Amino acid sequence: MSVLSLIHFTKYLYISQCPCLTCVPLGSQSLEELEHLEIWGCSTLMNLSSSGRLPRRLQRIVIADCPELQSIAEIFDDAMSLEYIKIWGCKNLKCIPEGLHNLIHLNAIYIWDCPNLVSFPEGQLCYTSLTILSVERCMKLRALPDRIHSLYSLKELELRQCPSIMSIEEVGAAQAHLSPNLEIRGCVYDVSFPQEEKGMVLPSSLTELTIARFPRLKHLSSNGFQNLTSLECLSISDCPNLQSFPDTGLPSSLLQLYIYDCPLLKKRCKRDKGEDWSKIADIPRVRIDGRFIYDPK
């Protein structure tokens, strides 16, 4: 008799370092009251649910470091209580179950280190209560969920090292309810940003933007930044080959600019002498490598 068969109506199940586990009997009666599921370091786990379904009371699911995982479930429709999903280090996972858009209580999704994940399921997340979407190091992911900008509740969007995503969908102002913070990090091949030649567009509703760890970045697109009419805070770091700001300058709405470890750009921003000095002189708060631009030398 397995350990799982001895569990009756548990609400919390934590499984760690079980090298022989290939699936979990989530469709069994003994787990129908399950609310919180965490699975870590199960090297042979291929299918999370042997039945293809998740418990209807499940609220929180965390799966980490399960490199052979191929499937979480066939569909999310039974798990209408889900509030939190975190999937991390599942290198063989290629898709997220259908029905994600029906999870009206869902407020956070974290998907990290899933290099073979290709897409989110079809369906708009309009009716979810999603506040956080964090996607990192998903090298083959082609797009974010449909019409993500229609989410009134979204407060935090993190997108890091996902080079196959070419656009962050732009919508009309009446629908652009994305909370205005965006971080983009670790794009190792990009020479320009945003990549206009590939149709990359940033939402005009952004007020805060962080660009970090672009080792080959040389240019910031003039058209791409002209669109950011609400931008108030811009942070640029670890871009050693970035040579200049856009020819048309930075948005007039900009109130704060932070530059770290960008030696070529730093030289061009030298007070009263640099070629880009005129583009930053009117910004109220500018710090370069931790120093305010008007600090005494």
Image: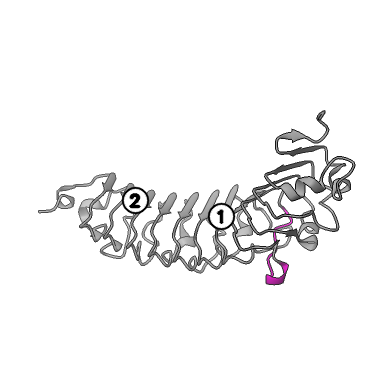
Give percent across and percent down for residue 6.
Answer: 14, 48
| Amino acid residing under circle 2 | Arg
- Mark 2 lies on residue: 57
The reply to whether residue 189 is in sight is: yes
* 202 drawn magenta: yes
Secondary element at tag 2 = loop
What label does residue 160 carry, if any? 1
- What residue occupies the far top of the structure in this picture? 296
| Amino acid residing under circle 1 | Arg
Q: How many marks?
A: 2
Find the magenta span and give its range.
196-205
The secondary structure making up most of the magenta span is loop
- Look at the image and tell me in which quarter the N terminus lies: bottom left
User: Is 20 placed above or below 6 here?
Assistant: below
Between 51 and 203, the one nearer to me in the picture: 203
Give percent across and percent down for residue 243.
Answer: 76, 55
